[in-house]
Image: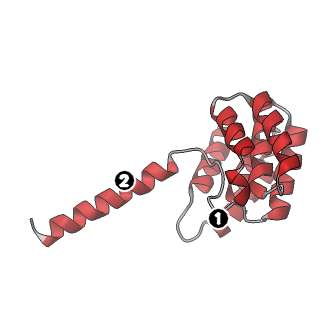
Amino acid sequence: MTRLTLNLKTIFVFVLLTLAGTAAANLGDADDDDLDNPLITQGKSELQNENWDGAIAVFEEALKATSGSADLHNFLGYAYRKSGNLKFAFEHYGKALEINPDHKGALEYLGEAYIQSGDLMSAEKQLTKLKKICSPIPCEELRELQAAIDEAKK
């Protein structure tokens, strides 16, 4: 095999692995200590099963037992939004962003909550923040919020 063929194969494998990593839902930052808590693991399982009320109950319990990380508040915001409770979704996305103003998942999901509430202007503000954070290489959260905004404008 030539060196060019080996380099192309290496690039191809790298691209495949990168894409595979972006296919999963944004279920938290790997460096968050709270993510090792069994309650959070259980709550994430409830999210994956689309059991919004179950996820809310478990994550609310986890808040009592952990430091209340940005990821945990983002998970709660997501579960509340999916259950239709935008008031509590906005509250928890806000708390996540107080803890970590650059939390990409919270910015994306907050933008999606704004879309759900009919406030495209505020959704686009979250998109602008993601563009600054996800530069020069666009991140999954940016692409997903952009797609949601584009769909809402149809």
Secondary element type, mark 1: helix
Q: How is the image coloured?
A: secondary structure
Picture quadrant of residue 55: top right
Give the residue type that dot 2 points to: Leu
User: Which class describes the residues within 10 Å of circle 2: few (<14), some (14-19), or many (20+)?
Assistant: few
Q: Identify the element where label 2 is drawn.
A: helix
Left or right placement of residue 62 versus residue 8 in this view: right
Residue pictured at 81% horizontal, 60% vertical:
97
Indicate left or right for 91 with 52 as reference: right
> Which residue bears the numbered disc 1?
131
Nearest to viewer (mark 2 / mark 1): 2
| Type of amino acid at the residue the image marks with label 1 | Lys
Q: Position of residue 117 (x, y in %)?
A: 83, 38
Which quarter of the rendered picture does the N terminus lie within? bottom left
Query: Which residue is nearer to you in this view: 92 or 124?
Result: 92
**Mark number displayed over residue 16:** 2
Residues packed near mark 1 inside 10 Å, few (<14), some (14 to 19) or many (20 plus): some
For image coordinates 44% across by 52% down, the residue present is 19
- Relative image position of residue 141 (x, y in whole percent): 62, 53
**Residue 26 % position (x, y):** 62, 49
Where residue 127 sits, quadrant-wise, is bottom right
Q: Of marks 2 and 1, which one's residue comes earlier in the chain?
A: 2
Separation of residues labelled 2 and 1 (CA atoms)? 24 Å
- What residue appears at the point 90 percent right and 40 percent down from the top-left corner? 87
Name which residue lies at 10% across and 69% down.
2
Left or right side of 13 for 110:
right
Q: Is residue 14 visible?
A: yes
Residue lying farthest to the left in this orientation: 1
Residue 90 against residue 15 in the figure, above or below: above
Asked whether residue 124 is in view, the answer is: no
Who is closer to the viewer here, 66 or 9?
Answer: 66
